[in-house]
């Protein structure tokens, strides 16, 4: 009887240990060194602190970004709902666990915004961001992205984003976003807004956002 009880205890302990190990592996199917390597790779384009980079093409700030939004965008690249061949190649090899880990790592960074832009039209940009443009059916940006432009959940942080990146995204929205009409995501909200803003208004909002911390 004692032997049976001991066997049961050993079997239970072994099963519990295996279950815990399997759960840990499911949560993180990569090592810390692999995570660091991925982060370092991302930083070659997005800046050493994820603050973005200005080169031949503006690379967006990832620092402080909402994790849910980052994961959603990686999935959009993979599913080709968002058109970007470079990011498709980067994203499609990532496991869901790695996506979440990367998103959290970048969310936790908080560098100062990149400088080097004109400070003209900050007042107009702030007014559009907080109040919208009624005559053009443009709602306040703050209604989704927050008064501080730090975003929430699936709505991205815009504070500190590169001026030229914001401008390029808003003026080329249909060429990159919403590429699968049968599988829209919340980026569809921005399509009519981007179309209803004038070039000057987009520049003003982009300038205001890039000035925020």
Image (cartoon, rainbow, N blue to C red):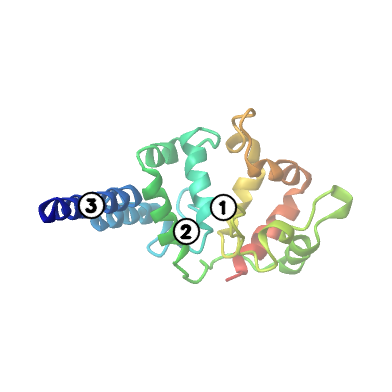
Choose between 116 and 72: the one closer to the eye. Answer: 72
Identify the residue at image location x=33%, y=47%.
26
- How many residues crowd around disc 3 within 10 Å: few (fewer than 14), some, or many (20 or more)? few
- How many residues crowd around disc 1 within 10 Å: few (fewer than 14), some, or many (20 or more)? some
Mark 2 to mark 1 CA distance (whole Å): 9 Å
Displayed quadrant of residue 151: bottom right
In this rendering, position of residue 171 left or right of residue 197: left
Disc 2 and disc 1 in contact, CB within 8 angstroms: yes
| Residue 52 badge | 2
Label 3 or label 2, whichever comes before in sequence order: 3
| Residue 79 image offset from top left, x and y in percent | 49, 33
The secondary structure type at the circle numbered 1 is helix
| Residue 213 image offset from top left, x and y in percent | 57, 71
| Residue 91 image offset from top left, x and y in percent | 41, 41
Identify the residue at image location x=39%, y=37%.
92
Residue closest to the far top: 182
Identify the residue at image location x=21%, y=55%.
13
Q: Nearer the viewer, mark 3 or mark 2?
A: 3
Look at mark 3 in the image and give the residue it sits on. Answer: 12
Q: Is residue 55 above or below residue 119?
A: above
| Residue 52 image offset from top left, x and y in percent | 47, 58
Choose between 158 and 124: the one closer to the eye. Answer: 158
Identify the residue at image location x=64%, y=41%.
173
- How many residues crowd around disc 2 within 10 Å: few (fewer than 14), some, or many (20 or more)? many
In this rendering, position of residue 212 left or right of residue 42: right
């Amino acid at each position: 009887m004692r032997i049976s009880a001991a066997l049961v205890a050993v079997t239970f302990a072994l099963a519990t240990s295996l279950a815990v190990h399997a759960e840990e592996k499911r949560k993180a199917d990569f090592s810390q060194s692999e995570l660091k390597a991925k982060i370092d790779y991302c930083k070659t384009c997005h800046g050493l602190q994820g603050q973005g980079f200005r080169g031949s093409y503006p690379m967006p700030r990832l620092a402080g970004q909402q994790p849910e939004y980052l994961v959603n965008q990686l999935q959009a690249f993979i599913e080709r709902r968002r058109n970007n061949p470079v990011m498709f190649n980067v994203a499609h090899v990532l496991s869901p666990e790695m996506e979440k880990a990367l998103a959290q790592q970048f969310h936790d960074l908080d560098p100062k915004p990149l400088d080097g832009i004109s400070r003209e039209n900050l007042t107009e940009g702030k007014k559009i961001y907080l109040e919208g443009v009624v005559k053009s059916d443009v709602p306040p940006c703050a209604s989704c992205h927050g008064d501080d432009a730090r975003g929430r959940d699936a709505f991205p942080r815009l504070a500190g984003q590169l001026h030229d990146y914001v401008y390029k995204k808003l003026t080329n929205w249909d060429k990159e976003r919403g590429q699968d009409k049968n599988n829209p995501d919340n980026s569809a909200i921005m399509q009519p807004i981007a179309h209803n803003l004038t070039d000057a208004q987009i520049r003003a909002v982009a300038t205001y956002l890039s000035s925020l911390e």
